[in-house]
């Protein structure tokens, strides 16, 4: 069954999303009827296909939530993000509910964040202080993509300010005050940030709350 799922991912990427001019999405969340997760092997297959396609890709959303990913499986995904979207184009990245990613997996993905992301979801990724610090530093390098948006479709006001940049990093109890301090220091330098979800983070403490 997993092999069938991987072939479906491959066919979809090669045949449909790569050809659409108006953008598309890759959603690898498990089907509620079978709950089959793509796992690390699926993530590696996805990264391989993305790397094989010449940029720019007609892809705006990448959803890898609840896929049972670990740091061992997201290396090629990170490489594909760095290669395919270095100039922008991807607006949403969701890797939530993959607690096996840990600091190493979060750091790998953080270092490859496309600069035009507006929706970033790293909730429940097993992130600790080093992962949060890496993500915080990467978020300050985000930019505003005035070429990939249109007023009619994405609500871009004059001047190219993003409609709303949203960050979700909740359900990461291993992050302590030090990690939240890194994020708090980065927040003023994250362009266009309008929403932050840091719920259910038991390690935050009073110092973490004060930092945010």
Image (tube, rainbow, N blue to C red):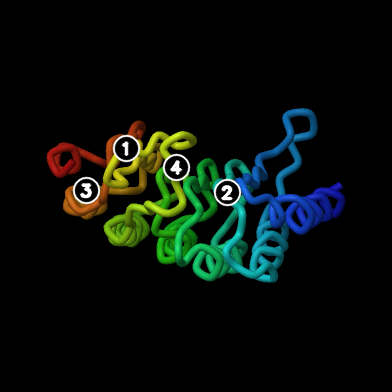
Circle nearer the N terminus (3, 4):
4
Report whether 164 appears left or right of 69: left
**Residue, disc 1:** 157
Q: Residue at x 41, y 66 (%)?
A: 111
As helix, strand or loop, the secondary structure at mark 2 comes to: strand
Residue 86 position, x and y percent, is: 46, 67
Give residue 187's mark: 3
As helix, strand or loop, the secondary structure at mark 4 comes to: loop
Mark 4: few/some/many CA within 10 Å (<14, 14-19, 20+): few
Q: Are the residues flagged by discs 3 and 2 in contact, CB closer than 8 Å?
A: no
As helix, strand or loop, the secondary structure at mark 1 comes to: loop
Distance from the alpha carbon under mark 2 to that under mark 4:
20 Å
Mark 2: few/some/many CA within 10 Å (<14, 14-19, 20+): some
Mark 1: few/some/many CA within 10 Å (<14, 14-19, 20+): few
Circle nearer the N terminus (2, 1):
2
Residue 119 position, x and y percent, is: 43, 42
Report whether 108 appears left or right of 16: left
Q: Residue at x 49, y 60 (%)?
A: 105
Q: Considering depth in this image, is 161 or 176 the residue closer to the camera?
A: 161
Give residue 62's mark: 2
Mark 3: few/some/many CA within 10 Å (<14, 14-19, 20+): some
| Residue 209 picture quarter | top left
Which of pointers 2 and 4 indicates the residue nearer the eye?
4
Q: Are the residues flagged by discs 3 and 1 in contact, CB closer than 8 Å?
A: no
Circle nearer the N terminus (1, 4):
4
Circle nearer the N terminus (2, 4):
2
Which of pointers 3 and 4 indicates the residue nearer the eye?
4
Give residue 150's mark: 4
Which of pointers 3 and 1 indicates the residue nearer the eye?
1
Distance from the alpha carbon under mark 1 to that under mark 4:
9 Å
Q: Residue at x 42, y 54 (%)?
A: 147
């Amino acid at each position: 069954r997993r092999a069938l799922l991987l072939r479906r991912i491959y066919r979809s990427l090669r045949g449909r999303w790569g050809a659409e001019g108006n953008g598309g999405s890759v959603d690898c969340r498990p089907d509620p009827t079978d709950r089959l997760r793509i796992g690390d092997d699926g993530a590696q297959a996805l990264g391989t296909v993305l790397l094989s396609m010449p940029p720019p890709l007609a892809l705006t959303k990448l959803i890898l939530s609840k896929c049972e990913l670990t740091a061992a499986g997201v290396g090629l995904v990170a490489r594909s993000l760095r290669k395919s979207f270095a100039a922008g184009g991807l607006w949403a990245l969701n890797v939530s509910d993959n607690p096996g990613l840990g600091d190493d997996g979060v750091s790998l993905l953080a270092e490859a964040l496309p600069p035009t992301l507006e929706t970033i979801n790293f909730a429940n990724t097993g992130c600790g202080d080093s992962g949060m610090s890496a993500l915080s530093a990467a978020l300050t390098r985000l930019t505003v993509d005035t070429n990939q948006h249109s007023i009619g479709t994405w609500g871009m006001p004059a001047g190219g300010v993003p409609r709303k940049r949203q960050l979700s990093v909740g359900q990461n109890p291993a992050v302590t005050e030090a990690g939240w301090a890194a994020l708090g220091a980065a927040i003023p330098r994250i362009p266009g940030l309008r929403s932050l979800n840091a719920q259910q983070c038991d390690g935050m403490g009073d110092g973490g709350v004060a930092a945010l």
